[in-house]
Image (spheres, rainbow, N blue to C red):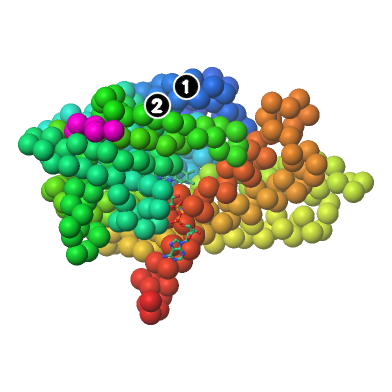
Amino acid sequence: MEFRDSPEQQRFRMEVRSWLQKNLPPGWGAPGKRGPEIPAERFGFAKEWQRVLYQGGWAGLAWPVEHGGRGAGILDQMIWSEEYARAWAPDQMSISVGITLTGPVLIGCGKPWQQKRFLAPILSGDEVWCQGFSEPNAGSDLAALRTRGEVRGDEIIVTGQKIWTSFALYSDWCILVVRTDSEVERKHDGLTFLLVDMKTPGIDVRPLVEMTGESWFNEVFFDKVRVPVDNVVGEIGGGWSVIIDTLSHERVSASPHARLKAEIAWLQDLARRVPRRGGMACDDPVIRQRIARVTIELTALGVSAYRNASQIERTGSPGPGGSTLKLGWSELDQRVKELAVEILGPRGLLLHDDPDAIDNGHWSHELLWSRAATIYAGTSEVQRNIIAERVLGLPR
Ligand SMILES: Cc1cc2nc3c(=O)[nH]c(=O)nc-3n(C[C@H](O)[C@H](O)[C@H](O)COP(=O)(O)OP(=O)(O)OC[C@H]3O[C@@H](n4cnc5c(N)ncnc54)[C@H](O)[C@@H]3O)c2cc1C
């Protein structure tokens, strides 16, 4: 693996850097900037920024050119992520389901009309998607889901409940998995993958409050919701393979080290600014050692990300190595946020609306939010199972 940019990659890096410098929304480009506080406004801001990315030719970086993307290879995607994080550009997570999950799944498994109808508005930010997979008692064990889909003529009538559906309140469409056949021997059979218009009568979205005080995820109830059979992706009853395809996109972030690198640099700066025991936090040998430790772990994560990328380049497939990155990133992310709040001492309790909060309460918010990282997109325990069985070849 060559860690230095080739002249071509260096040119690409400079192009990304200069485009971001010229086009970032006003006030962005430094650590700690938050979007609008009101969720609906923050969501509108993310859509607006997506439009700017689209017009600049940067939406769907990894999507094939024939579907409106940029067709960038894995190493260029990494360069984009590194520069994006370096520039402290806005986080696009609230509208990411369309770009990272729905789009790639439709490109791989969708019908031509579905690709024609749905891909362009995802790229432009005009239509936003949510992911209706998890249910009470069906998260890690997704195939245990019980939301029913009854096939009646050219419609599927959906009744049941989803939970933890991020951003459902603001989404236009949902990728939804339902059980259309319960008389099956294997629970992975009899599932169907649907594209559902969130404005269809019978859908009730109820926000849940997270420990950050924000309300991003939701319970979604379906009461005899009529979905055209044409909106099935893949075959009726054959949804499991589409789910596996979706999850393979969810588990793989090619450059989990990028944002963390920017945050650790900011953490080092924090230690220079915050007083501790008569000096500054950075004078405390224990704090210095812990900062050194997370910095070393970050370097290891970055190297693993490049190793994974070179495997993808060679074989075209991410393989189970993506689990190592997800596990390494999510657990390191939590350690970084815990260290930051420890450096802050009692002021680590202050959130962004407190005038005495350092860095506008960023670190305390992030400490709370980071707890989610080891749960979504496959819990740490599930990732360890995958690594044990599929990377290390250990027995089940
Ligand atoms: C912030 C956030 C956003 C989310 N957004 C969405 C979304 O938009 N759409 C959506 O569908 N879902 C979403 N989820 C749900 C997420 O996918 C599930 O929470 C996750 O799959 C875990 O499922 P569960 O919560 O039911 O926990 P469970 O699967 O019940 O797990 C409970 C505990 O048991 C452990 N466990 C389970 N199975 C095993 C096993 N085989 N071996 C060892 N340990 C095991 C787990 O690691 C965990 O510690 C989101 C979750 C979070 C935290």
Residue situated furthest right in the rendering:
278
In the displayed structure, 146 sits above or below 382; it is above
Q: Nearer the viewer, residue 147 or 97?
A: 147
**Residue 26, which numbered label?**
none
Look at label 2 and name its amino acid.
Answer: Tyr
Q: Quadrant of residue 206?
A: top left
- Real-space Cα separation, disc 1 to disc 2, in angstroms: 7 Å
Q: In the rendered structure, which segment of residues is drawn in magenta?
A: 223-227
Residue situated furthest bottom in the rendering:
395
**Do callouts 1 and 2 mark residues in contact (Cβ within 8 Å)?**
yes
The C terminus: image quadrant: bottom left
Could you tell me residue 41's position as x and y percent? 49, 20
Is residue 81 visible to the viewer in this orientation of the structure?
Answer: yes
Judge from the rendering whether residue 275 lies leftward or rightward of residue 200; answer left or right.
Answer: right
Q: Main secondary structure of the magenta part?
A: strand
Q: Quadrant of residue 93?
A: top left
Which residue is labeled 2 in the image? 170
Which residue is labeled 1 in the image? 40
In the displayed structure, 172 sits above or below 288; it is above
Residue under the point 69% across and 33% down: 351
Q: Nearer the viewer, residue 269 or 372?
A: 372
Q: Nearer the viewer, residue 235 or 360?
A: 235
Could you tell me residue 244's position as x and y percent? 27, 55
Could you tell me residue 259's position as x and y percent? 53, 44
